[in-house]
């Protein structure tokens, strides 16, 4: 088998495209960022969700393995959203959500769980969403669309990026 | 005052919920039904803002009913009132506002009513203009404040419907254009959510912004706004005066910073139309022998197509005809710079020849 088959080039091409896309979004979207926490004990799952979120939204996403770590951080910085597994090693995820709300009243709380029966408790707590694990990409996209806030931002206009300076001579810009 | 419908197959529960809702003071019960079918049939008349639905019912279950309801009334708030707890995950998926267990606890019911009250867009109207820019980066200013879209699908949906301003676009078409990678069944709830978000965002503008849904088509109608896309389209329809400003807008690219694939066809269309209009004008001006206006139209053309070989050659010729040596040299220098900057290239041979020949002639 030839190492440089057509599929090899296709793969390289795809990889480059993906890299380019993430690079472009990083450059253009540096200015706006939402802060999101993922609280999940299983490292692979946590990592997967953080990566997925990073590819979907212009956000700064952090992962936490325990409720304690997350609460400590939350007491120091403002966060817009927390995605919390209802089952955590050190604390019940549902009561962690409650504590987070007490600390930062505006924070969006989304629970994820492999236990569907926790959804009822999520409703009682007025959680913003509940994801039954494992969930599809489209379900995550739905959640993100739902919890996003569209507050009006003050200040006029913005700076246009990527537009060449200096027009055709004789025409003032 | 919100309008609500209630569906439950048990008469006495229906009565109890009706009373509780009526007592709220801000929700009126349009009608209480003991069968889901009748409720769907009368949806056009009742047009409810909220629905209180039982789940296990004979004929049609409450989850299916909610799906059908959302399909036809995407803006409705759904509250499930049921004796079973196993549908809560599904209820979250349907974006139900709440899920209450039977027997109904009155305190819990009040808490739910407060959530409905909080979901009503605030009345306070935004004073001032609606300004929409679509060239380059999408930007929406309401009374001087910028809408913070955060790259949401609501933003893309807004831009898409704005592009089809005034026309109803079929749901299936929207799903295909905006969520090409998703199974349409999975994308529908995202579309519905985005629609609701848009309605809430523009609620303060009153009826200036209307987002309608009828016979499976969504349409956006905006009156009284400053929108650069409308300006460009109006100028292309009947273009009096100078098109420089329009050419500059088109040069930025339609929604070019957003990276929407569907916007490319529109950009192409705008460019082609503008090019046609400008070329016709160049033609007209040169047959009239008006050197200055030929030059003006050519420059407008170059603001969005800077490398057009033919136009650049003509510009040089126009300067030469007017005996403006420095103007010609300046233009050539500009072309060299632009090409070097964007493509690391020299001007095309024909332009070089024209420039050299004209420079000699002028000496």
Image (tube, coloured by chain):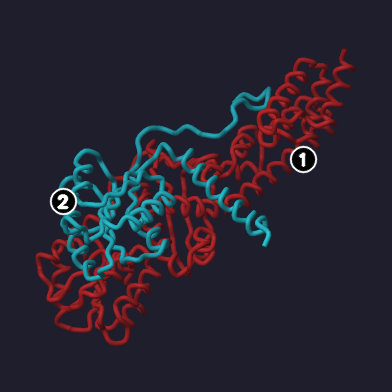
Chain colours: A cyan, B red
> On residue B3, which mark appears?
none
Residue located at (60% from left, 45% from top):
B233
Residue located at (20% from left, 54% from top):
A97
SS class, disc 2: helix
B302 or B165, nearer to the observer: B302
Quarter of the figure that contains the N terminus of chain B:
bottom left
Q: On the picture, is B205 further left or further right than B352? A: left
- Which chain letter goes with mark 1? B
Residue located at (43% from left, 52% from top):
A56
User: Which residue is farthest bottom?
Assistant: B58
Expressed as whole percent of the image width and height from the top left, the position of residue B18 reads 17, 73
Q: On the picture, is A11 further left or further right than B207? A: right
Q: Quadrant of residue B29?
A: bottom left
Expressed as whole percent of the image width and height from the top left, the position of residue A171 reads 65, 25
Q: Which residue is mark 2?
A: A99
- Which chain letter goes with mark 2? A
SS class, disc 1: helix
Gap in Å between the C-alphas at discs 1 and 2? 68 Å
Characterize the local packing of mark 2: few (<14), some (14-19) or many (20 or more) Cα atoms within 10 angstroms.
some
Expressed as whole percent of the image width and height from the top left, the position of residue B137 reads 51, 40
Q: In the image, which is nearer the foreground, mark 1 or mark 2?
A: 2
Expressed as whole percent of the image width and height from the top left, the position of residue A91 reads 16, 56
């Amino acid at each position: 088998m030839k190492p440089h088959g057509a599929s090899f080039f296709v793969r390289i091409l795809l990889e480059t495209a993906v890299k380019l896309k993430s690079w472009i979004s990083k450059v253009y979207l540096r200015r706006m960022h939402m802060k999101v926490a993922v609280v999940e004990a299983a490292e692979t799952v946590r990592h997967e969700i953080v990566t997925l979120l990073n590819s979907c939204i212009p956000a700064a996403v952090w992962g936490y393995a325990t409720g304690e770590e997350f609460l400590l951080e939350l007491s120091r910085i403002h966060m817009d959203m927390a995605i919390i597994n209802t089952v955590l090693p050190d604390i019940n995820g549902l009561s962690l959500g409650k504590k987070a709300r007490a600390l930062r009243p505006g924070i969006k709380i989304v629970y994820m769980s492999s236990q569907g029966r926790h959804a009822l408790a999520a409703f009682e707590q007025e959680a913003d969403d509940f994801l039954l694990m494992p969930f599809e990409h489209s379900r995550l996209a739905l959640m993100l669309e739902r919890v996003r806030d569209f507050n009006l931002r003050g200040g006029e206009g913005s700076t246009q990026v990527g537009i060449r300076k200096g027009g055709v001579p004789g025409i003032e810009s | 005052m919100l309008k609500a419908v209630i569906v439950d197959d048990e008469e006495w529960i229906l009565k109890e919920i009706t009373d509780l809702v009526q007592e709220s003071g801000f929700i009126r019960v349009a009608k209480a039904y003991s069968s889901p079918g009748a409720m769907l049939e009368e949806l056009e008349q009742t047009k409810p803002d909220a629905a209180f639905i039982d789940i296990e019912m004979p004929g049609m279950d409450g989850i299916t009913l909610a799906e059908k309801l959302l399909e036809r009334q995407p803006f409705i708030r759904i509250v499930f009132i049921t004796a079973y707890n196993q549908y809560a995950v599904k209820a979250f998926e349907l974006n139900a506002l709440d899920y209450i267990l039977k027997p109904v606890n009155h305190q819990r019911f009040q808490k739910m009513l407060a959530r409905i009250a909080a979901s009503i867009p605030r009345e306070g109207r935004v004073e001032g203009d609606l300004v929409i820019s679509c060239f380059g980066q999408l930007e929406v200013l309401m009374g001087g404040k910028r809408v913070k879209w955060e790259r949401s699908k609501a933003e893309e949906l807004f831009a898409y419907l704005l592009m089809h301003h005034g026309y109803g676009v079929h749901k299936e078409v929207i799903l295909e254009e905006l969520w090409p990678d998703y199974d349409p069944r999975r994308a529908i709830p995202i579309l519905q959510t985005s629609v609701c978000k848009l309605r809430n965002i523009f609620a303060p503008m009153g009826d200036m912004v209307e987002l309608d849904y009828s016979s499976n088509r969504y349409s956006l109608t905006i009156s009284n706004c400053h929108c650069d896309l409308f300006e460009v389209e109006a100028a292309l329809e009947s273009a009096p005066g100078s098109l420089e400003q329009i050419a500059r807008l088109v040069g930025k690219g339609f929604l070019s910073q957003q990276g929407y694939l569907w916007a490319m066809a529109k950009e192409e269309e705008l460019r082609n139309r503008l090019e046609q209009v400008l070329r016709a004008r160049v033609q007209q001006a040169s047959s009239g022998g008006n050197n200055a206006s030929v030059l003006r139209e050519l420059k407008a053309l170059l603001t969005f197509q800077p490398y057009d070989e033919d136009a650049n050659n003509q510009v040089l010729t126009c300067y030469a005809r007017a005996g403006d040596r420095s103007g010609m040299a300046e233009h050539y220098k500009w072309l060299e710079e632009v090409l070097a900057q964007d493509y690391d290239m020299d001007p095309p041979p024909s332009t070089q020849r024209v420039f050299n020949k004209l420079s000699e002639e002028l000496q």
